[in-house]
Image (tube, rainbow, N blue to C red):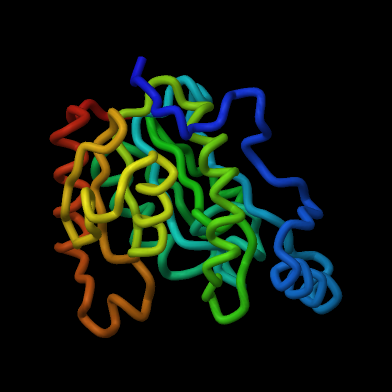
Amino acid sequence: MTPRPSTIATASERPEPGRDCPICPRLVAFRQEWRAREPLWHNAPVPTFLPVGGREAVELLVVGLAPGLRGANRTGRPFTGDYAGDLLYATLSRFGFANDRFAARTDDGLELFRTAITNSVRCVPPENKPVGAEIAACRRFLEATLAEFPNLRCIVTLGRIAHDSTVRTLGARLAAAPFGHGASHAVGGLQVISSYHCSRYNTNTGRLTEAMFVDVFDKVAAFLGRQPG
């Protein structure tokens, strides 16, 4: 079992916010606005996507920024419904961390292996930009989520916000584990590997290429071992 730093929440704390989580007023107002506009959408905090075998099977955790408005906020599953999911799940499948069933729908038959996926902020923020207070407030749920994974060994952080929030959650200083694409740091008994976020903006501008993203998961697979799911 991986040792846990004292900053990690106990397993008795709730790992997921409730559907009507009241903590962040701005996010609550935005959520309510979109519930009125699109009553059939999820429009609520998006829970962590767990693998076959549940929490004890998790060796790898992927931490993103926040649900996309017309992606996870619509579907209720992380990285489902927008381009970021196309690249993420294709890459996970390539390395045996998922099956090859992703079709951007929650009924597509997609399964994860040894891998869970969550966001550092669980509710969709306006313009996909959470503010500092919202990131800090939602960290309690990341803490509780980490406490649920006794066999966790590696975390991939997608983007600087997810990276910094994860490092802080693990009780480390940012200077000790700075963000950088492909950077790898031992933090709190875990290996944290960072990547630019797999957003359409980053890929369209060339900041992140498919090859660069594959290189990140090549490091992950080498660290965890390349057994297929």
In the depicted structure, whether residue 106 falls above or below residue 147: below
Q: In the image as oriented, which residue stretches furthest toward the top?
A: 1
Q: Quadrant of the N terminus?
A: top left
Q: Looking at this view, is 150 or 200 the one in front? A: 150
Q: Quadrant of the C terminus?
A: top left
In the depicted structure, whether residue 28 falls above or below residue 47: below
Residue 21 on image: x %, y %: 76, 53
Q: Is residue 162 left or right of residue 186?
A: right
Which residue is depicted at the point 21% across and 37% down? 186
Residue 90 on image: x %, y %: 33, 54
Residue 150 on image: x %, y %: 44, 20
Q: Is residue 201 left or right of residue 24?
A: left
Residue 6 on image: x %, y %: 45, 28
Which residue is depicted at the point 65% across and 41% down? 16
In the depicted structure, whether residue 217 falls above or below residue 33: above
Q: Is residue 165 left or right of residue 46?
A: left
Q: Looking at this view, is 25 or 73 the one in front? A: 25
